[in-house]
Image (cartoon, grey):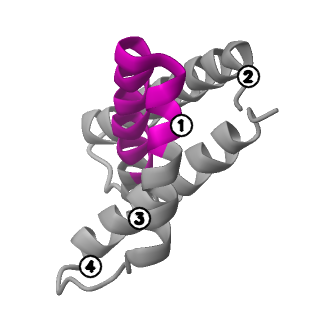
Amino acid sequence: MMNSTKTAETVEKLADVAARTLLTNQRRITDAFAACEIVSAGTMEALIQAQAEAHLTAGLQTRWNRGGMAAIESWLEETAERLIETNVGGWSSPVQNQMELAERKALQNAYKALSRCRD
């Protein structure tokens, strides 16, 4: 059984951190363009990771708001299966591979955080 208070706080914290990280990375890109600087690959990878985390946490918040604990418990089961069964890196595009890797990392981080909410 999961602790509902802790789960709600965790979903909120994940979303807050993801939103702040995304805004920070977007600002770095905007500042680099405004200064006519070349954006480094690392900066782009950080943006991709931040976008994956923000997208994931938006989905978690929607699940929490619509279905509460049952929806989060279901998400944990689905995510565990997805992490076990899904491979990363099958695309010919390095950018697509990086996006999948970022999504997988975001899933792993959220899964770990929400798993700690179990009693």
Disc 4 packing (10 Å; few <14; some 14–19; many ≥20)? few
- Residue situated in front as seen by the camera: 71 or 32: 71
Q: In the picture, residue 89 is in which quadrant? A: bottom left
Q: Is residue 94 left or right of residue 79?
A: left
- Up-down relation of residue 114 to residue 87 (above or below): above
Q: Residue 82 carries which label?
A: 3
User: Which is the main secondary structure of the residues drawn in magenta?
Assistant: helix
Mark sitting on residue 73? 1
Whole-angstrom CA distance, mark 1 to mark 2, is: 11 Å
Q: Name the residue under label 2.
A: 3
Residue 24 visible: no
Decide if residue 40 is on the left or right side of residue 77.
left
Assess disc 3: are there few (<14), some (14-19) or many (≥20) residues with their C-alpha within 10 Å of its C-alpha.
Answer: few
Front: mark 1 or 3: 1
Task: State the residue position of label 4.
Answer: 94
The span from disc 1 to disc 4 (Cα, nearest Å) is 33 Å
**Mark 1 vs mark 2: which is more N-terminal?**
2
- Three-letter code for the amino acid on which mark 4 is drawn: Pro
* Above or below, 93 relative to 77: below
Are the two marked residues, 3 and 2, in contact with CB atoms closer than 8 angstroms?
no
| Residue 82 visible in the snapshot | yes
Q: Which of marks 1 and 4 is nearer the N terminus?
A: 1
Mark in the foreground, 2 or 4: 2
Disc 3, SS: helix
Q: Which of marks 1 and 3 is nearer the N terminus?
A: 1
Q: Indicate the amino acid at tag 2.
A: Asn
Q: At x 82% / y 32%, what residue is drawn?
A: 119
| Residue 4 coordinates in the image, percent (x, y) | 67, 17
Going from the N terminus, do you reach mark 2 or mark 4 first? 2
- Quadrant where the N terminus sits is top right
